[in-house]
Structure formats: structure tokens, C-alpha cells
Image: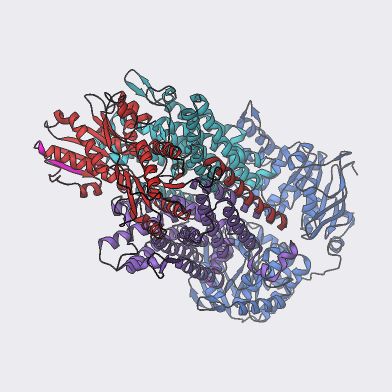
Chain colours: A purple, B cyan, C red, D blue
């Protein structure tokens, strides 16, 4: 095992990530055996549908966890972004791209608020995100009068184009011969690469991870830690805003008062991928693999005729086991 | 300065909380005359019971410097499991109640094991059990809602545990259980080794270990207490609202944790009281019942509760900053 | 140490395998039995109320009779639109001969419906069906006309409150679980519109207050709140739960001018019954409460006259008709919509066989 | 002397990659104070942790009162009568003094804790120790010294036969140390065996009867204190002779320009009206006892803590320093006393730590030029002779001295004109120590100026050009090195109002 670990490529990618990929493959194999209809291009498309918005959420929360913080408000905030901007879209004649920017802007507002309260007012991140979760839910609901909000369909002449961000329907020889191209995956990968670059190659990312590891030492190095801590939440806010666009791109409608469960899944994906809850260690690649595992799990569990409940149980168990193994192996090392 | 010492003894945070509580009461009573009715008080109590049990329980993990996010989905899960056995399998009600509490204890043990033995961050471990119990609840009941016996049905007696009908008047005797729980857990916290060690662990875990305190055991105990009370909360919830639907409960834990924090439990652990927690609970449930009476649409409640939470924490932070300066 | 890591992760994989494996054999014996059996996918709105269990019971019985398999899934709560979309997609990917669908939100399901059309899988709507579905996607519906069902409730209630109106301002409450799902909003609006119509016919001035959505959509209620004879107050909770419904029902029930209240589905009606447990304001000569659907709580409440009456759909018949339609459509037969109807029931006729067969626990 | 109460024979303990204890022997008699000495990392603490059951031993035997024993946790050791007073304070700040003293073995009435009895017992112990502490006071409200006394009270309250003091004096004022010695002598009279771990040679001479010296996890030897000199012990500890000659003359010209001037600095209780000047090319030593306010002065000056008033001039120009960012901008660097908490970012690499304060220099736009960063890191690893396999090594895996070098490199890269070295050699072995001294001398020759806070008198006398002495938050003396002596500094350090 140790020799395997020392192969340059394995070292470069990280052993843990390779194991996670293996788990992903094993799961795929297992579901293929358990369900006759699982090996199917459309299954992948529909699993990916779920992976897009979850992916952006998880990427966002990865930055926050990197600082040693936590954000429990991402799910409801994502819904709030989608609801408010969707309402504006349907009530005004603004083009859809403006509303997409508004969605991201609302995400940034919440990110700024959370970040400001955590970095400057020193409120524990857990509590402030609890509060902003309530506020996001309530605000979205008040804004629309507790109404469901619908984004335009793909057929919509003027505004439907934004759905091509999520998936592009390539029509072949006959109108029924449709191939779906997962454009959302491309977007997710591009954003993930950008995130990876920010986290690993820029000053911002460096300081975010360093302050997650030892905030006081970074502060005494003359670094504006408050700014960078807040920045992590703002980045998270941007990604939550983007997530909201991909959510409505896949599911069209959003209801106020919802979104809690996506917090848990996004955090679970990030942690599964090797991001440490204590801060300082974060992996974008790992987060993406974690998201894919959850997405595959949810599609697979549906495919074998079970309810989402099983997915929740299994996801919870996987995270507990993955993190325990990580902790035990690190304890052995020291 | 006799006055000051009394305040000091009770704790400033509690005095403030009590003040806010009274202000809210006066405000709602003035704003809407129907709020002053006895029946409103009864329904206020209905919301208080389950939040109170949850919050009393979750105080203990919070005091160890941890947290238990699984109480909300947990209580629904336990009530579903117990109710399913009673309603669909014909088990006697008392056994169903027992199962609900036992289930809570088992999940509490699991949490404690994950936190104390596996050394997982409490956030993460209980986040996972939050997901797991949410799933398990539905699985236990095959995805159906469970209507606990009520009205004149056989087994509906258990609802009298919380609301006894004498003649035409309902008496909220659930208060007795809540008060009893507060008194017992206050004694446990302040006058027994369990409570002392829970506080010690929250204050300085390493030091506690070096004093020869079995840290693992008492950490697990804290989570078991939390699970046990989540089980009781499940029963209280079933008694107040009869029908339990799967998929609920996410977000309930925030009411409980928020109540504890408003009541002065330190999020870092080591400091807090059960009586403070119960004051926080009353504020939470008062907001929940009171706000609809002043003709606020339900969605405003969430915003207001969010703001109240922020204000409570800010007061705490400013206060502790002043103390340390 | 890395060995352990690897071993551990394998354990996870195994755990997954076992859980899913066991679950599979436990839930539906899809794998066992002959593979030649036809297997239909049914996507419902959830299982949380016993109503859906009754639908399932009907469907299952019919499926056994026809010798086909059904796999019925539904999201955890009736608000999880995204979950339902995933379930629909998954159902389509299983490539069944036909799919039954009760859409929480048609727009959200459109993509799925489109892919079903692309894959030539016919869809049969049930419960509230798939309103406004694209042409040619939904072959038939086994559905309740919810707007009409709301009207039935209004007519039933009006009988009980007719005498109480006219002496000063009175209030009629309505608790709707949400303002978003098609079936609830249709029922709610059907009730309001019919009630307004009845009241106006008797010469009263009516106004609708409360939730903006229902206020905006209600027809004909043109009076101002100040000079209306009858106020219809619509309450919508923050969550689709009994406790949240109870929370918003209480203030309405406590208002001194309230004479009647309507809960437009099982959850909200149970919320009203629960609220009444403490308040004790509903019943003969008190507030006229009307529910919807059944279940043990509502049945008991109707029997002891806490509820003046309720409207029941025919869930068992919905289930049966659904499977019949699925079976027919996949055998190439022409299918037509089936209106499964709804009935008014109260303490007098609750035991009638015609009614009782549609009531469930 | 007295009869032997505790014998440890051939104790062996390995951690992954480290042979922490290599067949170590130790023998304690009744009624003696036995010093355990050795450099940091020599294995003293590990040995004591093996003794008290915190670590399990790989080999060897322990005899206590003639019987072979083996403790699997501290509680078992306590019950048997072996108690340790830890170096780091192990208190539960939210609990009261009495609750802390009896933590883990509360008196009970039935299943309830008998707090009243605990308070009474605590009072009895304090009376015996002849100190005045209120047992109902919350622990975190006490001064560090009093907290230490509570720790000792806790040890005494166990009906113990062997007490281990692990660097007890580190946090105490002079008078508190005297009190401690009184207590120790008292315990000695009662026939207890006392193990005393300390680095302070003066104390060893005063209080102990015998000295056992360890080096690199091995047993070097045991000598009788009275019959040996300081140099003997040092030689045993380091295995080579090191002469630490005090500096006799400052090399700083009298007219050297003032680079930093602090006037009337006030910050909390620990910094009261402190003023001083720092000249170019000078090492300004800050001496005083623990808790004299030196670190607090440095932190306030650096902007790490809030200051109430005071002016700071850099090169004659008044500057505003409200936070570390301002300080760094003005060319001040701060090397904290607590390296682990305030110095290094443990989970990050040597290169990342090296460029922590200067990252913008290594950035093209928002991107970090890792090649350039690595080059600089390598350069400083070479210059400071930091022992690390490569610049990607995580700092947490380096030894204390090398960690300190990484922190110094961070400020050297920043090219600060004024460097504050707060206990730069604490927890660092002798070899690395002299390297750091050498480096400091090199820096002042280059024209940098250094403020050096140190609790070690020899260090102050060896390195400083001028010495500021503080006591209880005030500056009590400013002494030129030519006039400085241990006595004069000590006098100023205990000059209270």
C-alpha cells in the first residue's frame, strides 16, 4: 500500500481522492448489478442534474469550512436567491441575465452579512448562519407572499436560453431523436477549476486556509485576517448565488421556506472529500468527488426502488466512516 | 448593594432574558385581547413542551463544548417509530412511549460514541445523525404519517399526561413535567458528578482528563441525556399535535439550541444553566404563538426569530467583552 | 494505516451494498417473480398523509388483479419539488411501459415529461393530475377536480352557517397548507369562489383577507374589510405540517366573530381539530368547522360533530383507475379521463357504505 | 539519606520515529527534593508521564514503596500517592477553586456533591500552605500565580507520597517562588519525595538535594547538589562545555539615531505609562519577572492588543498603530513567546510560513508565484541552517528550534527594521540557541534594531546593549549594559510601589 502511495501520480492527486474515486466506481458497479436499468446515459444525466447545484453549494461551503467556520444557511439562502430574482424576472421585463446577476448579488449580500458578523463582530459562525437561515427563509417568503416562483422554461423564446447552461438538447434527425449534453457539468468543472486556483494559487486562498489553521499567527504576521475571513463567506455567497441559477435551471420552480436539507448534503460532500471541519485543510477536487458520490447515491437508490430516506441514512454513515478513518489514520501518524 | 448581589447570583443574562420575556408578554397582551385568553395560554404550553424537553437535553452537549443537531429530526423519528408500533402494529401505548424514549437514548449513545470515542467533531457527527434520523423516521413508518391515538380512541390517555381535562376545563399539567425536568436536571447539573464533569469537560477537556475524569464516559452521558430528552420531546410533540409526519423536524433543533443560547449557555461550553435555557424556551415559544396574533403572516416569524437570535448573541458577546476588559 | 483506510472505505461500500440490497428485497419484490410481468412506475406527491396510503392500496389491489407490478415512490414532504423531479427522471430512466404522475408542480416536471415523450412513455395523471401539461404527454387522468371539490365544501358549509349571517360582521376562516401546490390552491379558490357566490346571492357584502395569493385570485369579493358583512380570512402556515397549520388556525378560531373554518386538506384539517382540542370552540352551535379528506383523526372529529362535515375524495378509486389506465394505455388501448369525484360527508352519513369505502384511517 | 520510596529502572519508551526514553533510571528518597534536569526534549516530561500513567512504558519496571506498580491512568497514580503539578496550568476556568481542587474525586452525600465540605477542606489546605485564596472564587478570576498555588493545593490534597513539580516557577513572581519553596520545604519535612523539574539553575541550587540529568532520552547521571557546581550540571546536560560570557560593552555608538520611540504607552492593567527608545543597531533587553507586563507592552506596541493611550514614533515620525497590519507596514516584526499559538501556522509548509507576512511580493496580480516563493524559502532555510528535508515540509513536523527559525525567516523576508523577539529561545535546545544569538548579532550589525524580551538573566546580560526592567506593568529601570548586573536587574524587577 505504501509503495502504491508513493507513485508520483498517486501522490500528486492524493491517495484519499483516489480511494474516493474507487468508492464512486464500486457504487456505480453495485447499482448496475442491483438495477437492470441503471446503465443508461440518461441516468447519468439525471444524477448530474442533482450534482450541479449541490456542487456549487459544496464548493462555496468548502471555503467557509476552510477558515474553520461553518455555514448552515446555504440551502435556504440559495432558495432565497432563486425566489427573489425569479419573482423580479416574472414581474418585470428585465432580461434573464440581469436576474441571474441579481441572484448572485443576493447570495453576496448574505455572504457579506454572515462574513461581517463572523469576522468583525465575532459571532460564532454556527449561530449567525442559523439566524440568517431563518431570515433567508422568511425574507423570500415575505417577498413573494409565500408563493411558488417559476423560472422560464426551455421553450421560452426570450429567456429560455439560460437553461442551456444546465443541459443542451441536441436535436438529431427527427424531433424525437434528442441527445442531452450536460453543459452544466462543463460549467461546474470550470467553476471548480477557478475555485481550485483561488484556493491554491492565490493570496486569498492561501490566507483563507492559513487562518483556518492558526488565525492568531496569521494576524500577528500583519495580515488583514478579518478581510480574508469575510472574503471566504463572500465567495461562498457568490457560489450559492450561482447554485440557485443551476437549481432553477434543473427544477424550474422554487418554494419559500425550504432548502434545509441541502445544507447537510453540501457540507457532507465537502467533508467526505477531505475538507477538515477544524479548518486549514480543504480540497476542491475532493469536494467535487463527494458531490458526485451523493448524486450517484441518490439516483442509484431511486433506481433500485427505494426512497430518498435511504440516501440520507447512507450519506450520513459514509461521512461518519470516512471522517473517522481520516482521524484514526492521522492519530496513528502522530 | 444588596440588589447587585442578587442580580449577580441569578446572573445578568437571566435577568435580561426574564425582562424580555415579560416585555413580550405585555406587548402581545396589549396588541390583541384574545391573546389574554386562558386557551391561548394552553396552546402556548403546547409549543413549550417539546421545545423545552429538546432544549433541556441539548443544553448538556452544548455545555461540554459540543452540540447536538440531531434532536429535531430525532424527535420526529422517535415519535414516528413509537407511533407506528402503536397504531399499525397494535402495541400498547405505554410500550410505544417507552420505545420512543429508548430510541432516543440509542441515537444519543451513537452520537456520544462518534464524538467521544471516534473523536469526530460534534457538529459533523450530529449533522450526520440528523440526516440519518430523518431517513430512519420515514423508513420506520414506511413513509406514512402516524396519527397517535387521540380523541376518544383507546390509548388516547397518554395525551392527558400533558393536558388533563377536569370537567370542561383543560389543565396544562405538562407544565408539571417540564418543571420537574428543569428541577431534576438543574440538580444533576449543579449537584452531581455527572453535571460537574460535563461542565469540567466543556471548560477544559484536557485538564478534566488529567484530573482522572473519565471524559469519554461523561461526554457520552451528555449526548445520551440529549437523546433521552429528544425522546421525551417526541412524546410531548405527539401529545400536542397528534399526527406525526415524516420528513419533519429539520429546523426544530435550531429552536432548541437558539433557546439555550438566548438563556445564556455559552457556545464554547463550560457555562450555562438549565433555568436559563427554559427562559429561552419560553421566549421562543412565545414568539411562535404570539406573532400570529398580531396579524403577522407566518413568514415574518422566521425573520423575527432570526433577528432575536442575533441580538441575544450580540448582547452576550458585548457583555463578555466588557467583563474581560 | 493506509491499508486501514482502504479497508474502511470498502466497508462503507459493503454497508451501502447491504443496506440497499436488503432494502431492495424488503420493499418491492421487483427482482423476484417473473421478469415478464409489466412494471409501472408511479410518482406520487408523498406518503405523509394516509390519503396516499389509500391510493396505494387501491393501486396495489388493482395491480394484483391485473397481474402487473407497480413501484410507487414519492418525496418526503409535499414541498420537495426537486426531489419529485429526480424521482420522475429516475422513473423514466427505468423505461417502464407507462408512468403515473401526480405532479407537485407541472413546470418543474416539464423536462421530465418532455423526456418521457421523447422516449415514447405515456403518462397518466392522477390525484390532481398534471395540469397544463404539454399536448400529447398526458394520455389520461384519474383525478379529482379540486376546484369542484372546494365548491362542494363551500356548499356543505353554507348549510350550517346560513342562519348565523346577517347579525353584524362575521368571519369565515380557511386554512390552506400552502399557496403553491396546484391541488391545494384549486381547492382553496374553489371554496372561496363558491362561498362568495352563495353569499352574494343572499345579498351580503364579502371581502377576502389574509394570504396575498388567495386574496389576489379570489373572484367577486369586492367589498372593503370595514363594510363587509362577511370576511373570509385565509391563513397559510410557514411549513406544510400539522403543527404549523395548528399555529395559524388558533388565532382565527379565537377571534370573536369567527363562525366557520375550513381546512382544505387532511393536514390542515387535522391542524384545526388539534387546535380545537384546547380551544373547544368548534361543534354544534359553535364554530362550523369543515375538513377535507379523511384519516382516523378527521373521522373521529366528524363522528363526534367537532367537524360539521368534510369532503372526501375517492383515493382507493383513484388508485384503481390509475392502474387500469396505465394497463390500458400500455396495451395500446385508447384511454379517457376518469373523474373520480368527491363526496360530502358528516356524522349522519359517515357510515353509509357509499361513503365509508372512500374513508381510510 | 532517607529510605527509597520510588525507583524507576530501565524505562524505555518509543514513539513512531522517536526513541523518547532509552533505558532511564531514577530513584527518589523520602524527604528529598530531587531535581530532574535536561534540555528541552531530553525526556523529562515523558519520563514523568510514564510514571503517572499518562503514557504506557515499553520496557522497564517501577517500584513504589517496595512493590512493583504500573499505572494505566493518572487517577491510579493519584490513588497510589503520586501526583503531578503540571507545567501548563490545568484548570477549568468556569469552575470555582474548590471545585477545581477536588475535580474527579468530589465529596459526596449520597449521589449529590457536597460542595460545602469541599470548600471547608480547601480552606484547611490553604491554611496549611499559609496562603489566602477564596475557594468559592471562579478560577479564571485569579492571577496566574494564584492559579499555580491552587494546582499545588490540589496536589497536596491528595494524600500523596511523591509530588512532581514540572517547571512550577515559570509563571511565578519572586515572592510567590519564595512561598513555593517554603511549601516544598514543609512537604519535605513531612517525608514526601519531591521531583522538581526546572531550567533555572539558581533554584536548583537553592531547593534541591540531588540532581538527575538526562540528555536525548538517556540517563546521564545523578549527583548531590551541594557537592557540584553549576558548570558541572550544565556540562552533564549538554555534554560539552559552554561558556556564556556576559556582554561588557555595547557596540552601539552613543549618537546612533533613534528608530523607535514609545511614549506613555498604556494598555490594560499590565502596561502602565511605559516609555522607551530604541536606537539603530541596538539590542534592547526587556527584563522582569513573569507577569511584569513585558509581553503585553510588546503586543500593545505591535497593535496585537488594544492600547488605551501612548504615542509611537518611527524614525522621529509619529505613527498610528492600531493593529498588526499597521505595525508591519511601519517595519516592525514580532516574534511571539508562544510559538505554537501565535507564531507558526502549524498545518502549513515551511515555504508558506516563510512568506506569510510578505505574500504580496510573491504575487502576480492575485496569483502566487510559487517558484519565486520556493526560491526565497530555500534561501532562508540555507541562511538560517534550518533543518528541514525540503521547503514543502509541514512546520508542525519540525523541532522547536527549527520552527523558531521559520518564524524568524518570516520577518527577515519582510525586511523589518525593528524586530521584537519575545522569549526567542524558550523551549529551544542549546545548539539552536547559540545559533539564534549569532543571528541576532548579525542582524544588528546589518543595522536592524531588536527588542528582546527574556526571562533568562544570562540571556539578557549576554545579548543586550541596554536593559529595560519592568515590574507590574511599569518600567522600573533602564540600565546600560556596562552598569548591569544580576543584582541590579533583580532589584528593579521587584521594585513595587
From this view, report whether residue D409 is shown above or below residue C348: below
* B54 sits left or right of A322 in the view: left
Which of A88 and C42 lies nearest the eye of the viewer? C42
Residue at image coords 36%, 47% = C102
- Residue lying furthest left: C203
Query: Which image quadrant is residue B200 in?
Result: top right
Which of B81 and A79 lies nearest the eye of the viewer? B81
Picture coordinates of residue C220, whole percent (x, y): 14, 46
* Magenta stretch encompasses residue D307: no
Picture coordinates of residue A103, whole percent (x, y): 36, 63
Q: Is residue D279 visible?
A: no
Residue numbers of the magenta segment: C201-208
Counting the numbered discs, the total is 0
* Magenta stretch encompasses residue C202: yes
Query: Which image quadrant is residue A116 in?
Result: bottom left
From this view, report whether residue D96 is shown above or below residue D255: above
Which of A198 and B87 lies nearest the eye of the viewer? B87
Picture coordinates of residue C6, whole percent (x, y): 68, 56
Q: Is residue C284 visible?
A: yes
Q: Quadrant of the N terminus of chain B?
A: top left
Picture coordinates of residue D446, whole percent (x, y): 66, 82
- Residue lying furthest top: B167
* D143 sits left or right of D436 in the view: left
Amino acid at each position: 500500500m505504501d509503495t502504491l502511495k508513493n507513485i508520483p501520480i498517486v501522490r500528486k492527486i492524493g491517495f484519499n481522492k483516489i480511494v474516493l474515486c474507487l468508492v464512486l466506481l464500486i457504487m456505480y458497479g453495485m447499482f448496475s448489478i442491483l438495477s437492470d436499468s441503471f446503465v443508461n446515459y440518461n441516468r447519468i444525466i439525471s444524477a448530474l442534474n442533482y450534482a450541479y447545484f449541490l456542487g456549487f453549494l459544496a464548493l462555496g461551503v468548502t471555503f467557509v469550512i476552510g477558515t474553520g467556520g461553518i455555514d448552515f444557511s446555504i440551502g435556504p439562502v440559495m432558495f432565497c436567491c432563486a425566489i427573489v430574482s425569479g419573482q423580479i424576472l416574472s414581474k418585470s421585463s428585465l432580461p434573464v441575465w440581469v436576474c441571474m446577476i441579481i441572484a448572485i448579488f443576493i447570495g453576496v449580500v448574505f455572504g457579506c452579512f454572515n462574513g461581517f458578523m463572523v469576522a468583525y463582530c465575532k459571532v460564532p459562525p454556527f449561530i449567525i448562519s442559523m439566524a440568517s437561515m431563518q431570515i433567508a427563509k422568511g425574507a423570500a417568503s415575505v417577498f413573494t407572499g409565500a408563493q411558488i416562483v417559476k423560472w422560464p422554461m426551455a421553450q421560452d423564446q426570450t429567456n429560455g436560453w439560460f437553461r442551456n447552461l444546465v443541459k443542451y438538447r441536441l436535436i438529431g434527425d427527427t424531433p424525437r431523436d434528442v441527445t442531452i449534453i450536460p453543459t452544466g457539468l462543463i460549467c461546474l468543472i470550470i467553476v471548480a477549476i477557478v475555485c481550485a486556483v483561488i484556493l491554491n494559487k492565490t493570496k486569498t486562498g492561501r490566507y483563507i486556509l492559513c487562518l483556518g489553521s492558526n488565525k492568531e499567527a496569521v494576524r500577528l504576521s500583519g495580515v488583514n485576517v478579518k478581510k480574508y475571513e469575510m472574503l471566504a463567506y463572500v465567495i461562498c455567497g457568490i457560489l450559492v448565488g450561482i447554485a440557485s441559477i443551476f437549481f432553477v435551471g434543473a427544477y424550474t420552480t422554487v418554494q419559500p421556506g425550504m432548502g434545509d436539507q441541502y445544507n447537510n448534503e453540501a457540507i457532507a460532500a465537502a467533508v467526505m472529500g477531505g475538507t477538515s471541519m477544524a479548518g486549514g485543510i480543504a480540497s476542491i477536487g475532493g469536494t467535487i468527488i463527494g458531490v458526485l458520490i451523493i448524486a450517484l447515491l441518490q439516483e442509484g437508490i431511486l433506481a433500485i426502488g427505494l426512497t430518498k430516506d435511504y440516501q440520507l441514512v447512507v450519506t450520513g454513515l459514509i461521512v461518519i466512516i470516512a471522517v473517522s478513518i481520516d482521524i484514526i489514520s492521522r492519530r496513528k501518524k502522530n | 448593594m444588596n440588589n447587585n448581589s442578587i442580580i449577580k447570583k441569578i446572573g445578568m443574562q437571566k435577568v435580561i432574558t426574564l425582562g424580555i420575556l415579560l416585555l413580550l408578554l405585555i406587548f402581545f397582551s396589549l396588541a390583541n385581547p384574545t391573546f389574554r385568553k386562558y386557551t391561548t395560554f394552553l396552546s402556548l404550553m403546547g409549543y413549550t413542551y417539546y421545545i423545552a424537553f429538546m432544549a433541556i437535553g441539548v443544553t448538556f452537549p452544548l455545555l461540554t463544548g459540543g452540540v447536538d443537531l440531531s434532536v429535531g429530526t430525532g424527535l420526529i423519528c422517535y415519535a414516528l417509530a413509537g407511533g407506528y408500533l402503536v397504531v399499525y402494529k397494535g402495541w400498547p401505548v405505554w410500550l410505544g412511549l417507552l420505545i420512543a424514549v429508548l430510541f432516543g437514548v440509542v441515537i444519543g449513545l451513537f452520537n456520544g460514541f462518534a464524538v467521544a470515542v471516534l473523536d469526530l467533531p460534534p457538529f459533523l457527527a450530529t449533522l450526520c445523525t440528523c440526516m440519518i434520523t430523518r431517513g430512519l423516521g420515514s423508513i420506520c413508518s414506511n413513509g406514512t404519517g402516524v396519527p397517535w391515538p387521540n380523541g376518544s380512541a383507546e390509548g388516547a390517555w397518554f395525551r392527558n399526561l400533558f393536558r388533563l381535562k377536569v370537567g370542561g376545563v383543560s389543565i396544562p399539567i405538562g407544565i408539571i413535567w417540564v418543571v420537574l425536568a428543569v428541577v431534576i436536571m438543574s440538580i444533576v447539573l449543579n449537584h452531581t458528578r455527572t453535571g460537574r464533569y460535563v461542565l469540567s469537560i466543556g471548560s477544559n477537556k484536557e485538564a478534566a482528563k488529567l484530573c482522572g475524569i473519565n471524559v469519554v464516559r461523561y461526554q457520552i452521558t451528555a449526548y445520551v441525556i440529549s437523546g433521552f430528552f429528544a425522546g421525551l420531546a417526541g412524546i410531548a410533540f405527539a401529545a400536542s399535535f397528534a399526527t406525526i409526519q415524516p420528513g419533519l423536524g429539520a429546523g426544530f433543533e435550531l429552536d432548541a439550541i437558539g433557546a439555550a443560547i438566548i438563556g445564556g449557555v455559552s457556545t464554547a461550553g463550560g457555562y450555562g444553566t438549565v433555568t436559563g435555557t427554559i427562559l429561552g424556551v419560553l421566549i421562543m415559544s412565545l414568539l411562535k404563538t404570539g406573532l400570529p396574533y398580531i396579524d403577522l403572516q407566518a413568514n415574518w416569524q422566521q425573520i423575527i426569530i432570526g433577528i432575536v437570535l442575533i441580538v441575544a448573541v450580540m448582547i452576550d458577546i458585548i457583555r463578555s467583552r466588557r467583563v474581560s476588559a | 494505516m493506509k491499508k486501514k483506510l482502504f479497508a474502511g472505505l470498502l466497508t462503507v461500500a459493503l454497508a451501502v451494498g447491504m443496506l440497499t440490497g436488503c432494502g431492495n428485497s424488503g420493499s418491492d419484490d421487483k427482482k423476484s417473480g417473473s421478469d415478464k410481468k409489466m412494471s409501472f412506475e408511479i410518482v406520487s406527491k408523498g406518503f405523509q398523509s394516509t390519503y396516499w396510503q389509500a391510493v396505494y392500496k387501491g393501486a396495489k389491489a388493482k395491480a394484483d388483479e391485473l397481474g402487473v407490478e407497480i413501484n410507487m415512490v414519492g418525496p418526503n414532504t409535499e414541498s420537495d419539488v426537486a426531489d419529485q423531479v429526480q424521482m420522475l427522471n429516475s422513473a423514466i430512466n427505468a423505461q417502464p411501459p407507462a408512468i403515473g404522475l401526480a405532479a407537485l408542480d407541472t413546470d418543474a416536471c416539464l423536462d421530465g415529461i418532455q423526456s418521457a415523450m421523447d422516449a415514447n412513455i405515456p403518462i397518466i395523471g392522477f390525484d390532481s393530475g398534471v395540469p397544463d401539461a404539454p399536448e400529447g404527454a398526458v394520455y389520461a387522468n384519474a383525478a379529482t377536480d379540486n376546484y369542484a371539490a372546494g365548491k362542494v365544501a363551500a356548499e356543505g358549509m353554507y348549510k350550517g352557517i346560513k342562519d348565523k349571517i346577517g347579525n353584524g360582521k362575521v368571519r369565515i376562516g380557511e386554512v390552506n397548507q400552502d399557496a403553491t401546490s396546484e391541488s391545494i390552491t384549486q381547492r382553496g379558490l374553489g371554496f372561496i369562489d363558491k362561498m362568495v357566490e352563495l353569499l352574494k346571492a343572499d345579498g351580503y357584502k364579502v371581502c377576502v383577507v389574509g394570504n396575498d395569493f388567495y386574496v389576489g385570485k379570489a373572484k367577486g369579493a369586492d367589498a372593503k374589510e370595514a363594510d363587509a358583512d362577511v370576511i373570509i380570512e385565509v391563513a397559510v402556515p410557514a411549513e406544510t405540517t400539522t403543527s404549523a397549520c395548528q399555529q395559524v388556525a388558533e388565532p382565527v378560531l379565537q377571534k370573536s366573530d369567527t363562525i366557520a373554518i375550513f381546512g382544505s386538506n387532511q393536514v390542515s384539517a387535522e391542524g384545526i381539530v388539534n387546535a380545537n382540542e384546547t380551544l373547544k370552540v368548534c361543534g354544534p352551535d359553535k364554530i362550523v368547522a369543515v375538513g377535507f379528506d379523511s384519516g382516523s383523526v378527521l373521522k373521529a372529529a366528524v363522528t363526534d360533530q367537532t367537524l360539521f362535515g368534510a369532503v372526501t375524495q375517492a383515493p382507493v378509486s383513484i388508485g384503481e383507475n390509475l392502474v387500469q389506465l396505465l394497463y390500458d394505455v400500455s396495451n395500446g388501448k385508447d384511454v379517457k379521463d376518469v373523474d373520480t369525484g368527491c363526496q360530502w360527508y358528516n356524522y349522519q352519513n359517515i357510515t353509509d357504505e357509499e361513503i365509508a369505502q372512500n374513508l381510510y384511517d | 539519606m532517607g529510605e527509597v520510596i520510588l525507583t524507576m529502572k530501565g524505562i524505555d519508551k518509543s514513539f513512531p520515529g522517536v526513541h523518547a526514553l532509552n533505558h532511564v533510571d531514577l530513584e527518589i528518597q523520602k524527604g528529598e527534593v530531587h531535581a530532574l534536569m535536561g534540555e528541552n526534549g531530553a525526556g523529562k516530561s515523558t519520563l514523568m508521564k510514564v510514571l503517572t500513567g499518562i503514557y504506557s512504558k515499553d520496557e522497564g519496571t517501577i517500584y513504589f514503596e517496595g512493590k512493583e506498580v504500573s499505572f494505566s491512568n493518572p487517577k491510579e497514580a493519584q490513588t497510589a500517592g503520586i501526583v503531578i503539578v503540571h507545567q501548563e496550568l490545568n484548570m477549568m476556568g468556569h469552575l470555582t477553586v474548590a471545585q477545581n481542587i477536588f475535580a474527579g474525586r468530589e465529596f459526596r452525600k449520597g449521589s449529590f456533591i457536597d460542595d460545602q465540605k469541599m470548600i471547608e477542606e480547601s480552606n484547611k489546605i490553604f491554611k496549611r500552605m499559609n496562603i489566602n485564596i477564596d475557594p468559592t472564587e471562579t478560577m479564571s478570576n485569579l492571577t496566574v500565580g494564584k492559579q499555580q498555588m491552587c494546582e499545588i493545593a490540589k496536589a497536596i490534597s491528595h494524600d500523596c507520597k511523591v509530588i512532581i513539580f514540572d517547571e512550577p516557577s515559570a509563571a511565578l513572581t519572586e515572592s510567590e517562588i519564595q512561598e513555593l519553596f517554603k511549601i516544598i520545604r514543609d512537604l519535605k519535612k513531612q517525608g514526601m519525595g519531591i521531583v522538581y523539574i526546572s531550567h533555572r539553575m539558581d533554584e536548583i541550587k537553592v531547593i534541591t538535594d540531588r540532581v538527575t540529568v538526562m540528555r536525548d532520552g538517556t540517563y546521564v547521571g545523578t549527583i548531590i547538589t551541594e557537592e557540584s557546581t553549576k558548570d558541572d550540571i550544565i556540562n552533564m546536560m549538554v555534554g560539552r562545555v559552554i561558556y556564556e560570557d556576559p556582554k561588557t560593552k555595547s557596540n552601539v555608538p552613543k549618537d546612533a539615531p533613534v528608530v523607535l520611540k514609545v511614549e506613555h504607552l498604556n494598555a490594560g492593567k499590565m502596561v502602565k505609562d511605559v516609555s522607551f527608545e530604541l536606537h539603530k543597531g541596538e539590542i534592547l533587553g526587556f527584563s522582569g519577572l513573569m507577569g511584569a507586563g513585558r509581553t503585553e507592552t510588546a503586543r500593545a506596541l505591535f497593535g496585537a492588543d488594544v492600547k488605551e493611550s501612548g504615542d509611537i514614533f518611527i524614525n522621529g515620525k509619529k505613527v498610528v498603530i492600531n493593529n498588526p497590519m499597521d505595525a508591519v507596514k511601519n517595519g516592525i516584526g514580532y516574534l511571539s513567546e508562544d510559538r505554537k499559538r501565535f507564531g507558526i501556522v502549524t498545518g502549513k509548509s515551511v515555504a508558506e510560513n516563510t512568506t506569510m507576512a510578505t505574500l504580496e511580493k510573491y504575487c502576480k496580480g492575485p496569483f502566487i508565484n510559487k517558484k519565486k516563493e520556493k526560491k526565497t524559502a530555500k534561501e532562508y532555510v540555507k541562511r538560517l541552517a534550518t533543518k528541514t528535508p525540503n521547503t514543502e515540509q509541514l512546520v508542525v513536523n519540525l523541532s522547536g528550534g527549527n520552527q523558531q527559525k521559520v518564524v524568524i525567516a518570516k520577518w527577515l523576508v519582510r525586511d523589518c527594521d525593528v524586530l521584537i523577539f519575545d522569549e526567542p529561545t524558550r523551549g529551544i535546545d542549546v545548539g539552536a540557541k547559540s545559533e539564534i544569538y549569532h543571528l541576532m548579532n548579525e542582524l544588528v550589525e546589518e543595522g536592524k534594531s531588536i527588542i528582546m524580551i527574556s526571562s533568562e538573566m544570562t540571556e539578557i546580560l549576554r545579548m543586550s546593549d541596554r536593559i529595560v526592567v519592568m515590574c507590574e506593568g511599569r518600567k522600573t529601570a533602564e540600565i546600560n549594559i556596562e552598569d548591569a548586573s544580576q543584582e541590579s536587574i533583580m532589584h528593579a524587577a521587584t521594585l513595587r510601589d
